[in-house]
Amino acid sequence: MMMTARVLHRRLGAALAAVVLAAIAPARTARAGKFGSTRQYKCVGQPITLTNSNTGAVQNGGTAPTFNTKGRAYCLLEIHTYHWNDGQGAAPGTVGLTVVSGTGGAGNTIGPFAATGSNGQGGVHNANWDVSVPQAPAPVVIKGKYSCLDSDPSTWAQNQQSNGLGFCTLVVQKAVKAKAPAPAKPTYACQGSQVTLFDNSNVFGVQNGGKQPFVFTVNRNYPGVFTWCLNSITTYHWNDGQGATPGKIGLRQALINLVAPNKFVPPTQATGSSGQGGALNVNWTVSFSTQQNPTIISGGYWCQDSSPKTWSQNQQSNGNGFCTIQATPAYVTNFTPPGGTPVPQPPPPTGNAPASSPPQGQVCSTNTYGLPIIYPHQVSPGGQASVLLACGTKTANSFTGALTPTGGAFTVPFGNCLNGVPPPSQPFITYGTGPGQVNPTACPNSIQAIPSSVDPNNPLALQITAPTQVGTYLVFVRTARGDLGTTGTLVVQ
């Protein structure tokens, strides 16, 4: 028996002429990230309906129609198919789109998604199959030709007016290119005791002519803290017992850190203090507040001094000028993502505890200005975790961009293999992974590859599988930009 088809409640837009009749075969599933992101598009204007449905009598056995956006980019909001099925409707299955050509790549699919049913003409149960397309973590953007997918062609309504093609309706919204969102703006709490983060001075005789030493913000007593509130920088100028008129000292970024809060600490006028034997202006010091707008450092830096000719050094310091850095652990207390709504964070931990992990469900790191974080940081042997880049990281710098893994992920056990190992003499993204950085005798199997893959729905997240052996590990991702370290440790227990 044939009945008059119900026209979906959406008003037909001017794009009705965009319907092109075609049918294609099932295809492989595409990663959602291939269909655009909030860093590329934003959705504007009123919803537009693209449909090939009509009010004529229908039969079963529809084949897939194709929609052509005619060069326009749209955010895909909803997909609807129609299953009159002689007035019986049909149990909802799945609905989606196949890419014929254009954004997403020919042969890939959007979805399919599980549909929900709604009543059709005369109250027929499940005559309509409805899907609201997920808009997180990014809207699905279509531009090109797309064929409707329906899991039950045997009940898919069609008629002569539709040329035998199953009734399908897309609800879309205009998509326009958008700039990348600004990085989230966190605030920090300087929590805990002051720590000597770096000190390369020693008690041996010195000469002038110090070179800039390398500083890395890692302290083995705080394995989960890579972000610090800077308290002070001090350099030493014995200068044959004469001291030197204080100049300027600061920090210059040495490591590739895409989201460092301070790529450098500008050279600042130091104050002098006496040293051994009362020699004037032997110590040059710059102090920083940890109460108002603390100076946050994370990553690797060169310690700078405006007077290398009087900067003390010796053989024991490898010719590097004496430099001491005092700092306090810094924890994110809240942050404001690009949407503008502040998100409070848990209170900072006390004692020598690692930095807190993001809330459940977070798809990128709230540790906006530090290194990527591990979440969750504690798993069972062989369990699953993620490496999360910072919210606001540009797509070009994501795990599908500049930081595309070239050698996967690997771990280095935290403990005797790394304790006391100095940072490299040349700038690297992190330490402990290059030649000579891990003792091959003490730790012959210290570097262990672990399975990893980019999250298909989030180019800022790398899914990893933890080692099967109980222990505490540092996690690294090998990329074309170098070995990317992560904040905190991965605890397997």
Image (cartoon, grey):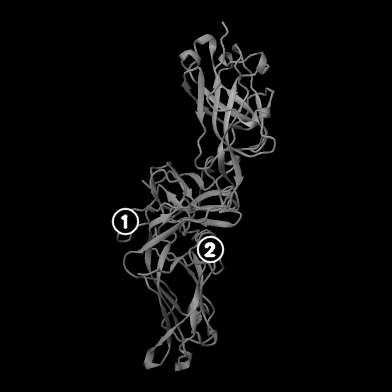
Circle 2 is placed at which residue position? 436
Nearest the camera: 34 or 238? Answer: 34
Residue 228 in sight in this render: yes
Measured as percent of width and height from the top left, residue 3 is found at 56, 10
Q: Residue furthest top?
A: 1
Name which of mark 2 and mark 1 comes first in the sequence. 1
Question: Residue, x 63% and y 39% (percent of image)?
Answer: 73
Mark 1: secondary structure: loop
Counting the numbered discs, the total is 2
Q: Amino acid at mark 2?
A: Gly
Question: Residue, x 46% and y 46% (percent of image)?
Answer: 363
Measured as percent of width and height from the top left, residue 313 is found at 49, 82
The circle on residue 115 is none
Above or below, 306 against 333 in this view is: below
Above or below, 117 against 436 in this view is: above
Q: CA distance from mark 2 to mark 1?
A: 39 Å
Nearest the camera: 321 or 83? Answer: 83
User: Could you say which quadrant of the image residue 80 lies in?
Assistant: top right
Nearest the camera: 349 or 166? Answer: 166
Q: Residues within 10 Å of mark 1 (few under 14, many from 20)?
A: few
Measured as percent of width and height from the top left, residue 374 is found at 44, 50
Q: Which marked residue is nearer to the observer: mark 2 or mark 1?
A: 1
The circle on residue 347 is 1
Mark 2: secondary structure: loop
Q: Amino acid at mark 1?
A: Pro
Measured as percent of width and height from the top left, residue 44 is found at 56, 42
Question: Residue, x 58% and y 26% (percent of image)?
Answer: 169
Above or below, 298 against 106 in this view is: below
Question: Residue, x 68% and y 22% (percent of image)?
Answer: 23
Nearest the camera: 106 or 226? Answer: 106
User: Could you say which quadrant of the image residue 474 lies in?
Assistant: bottom left
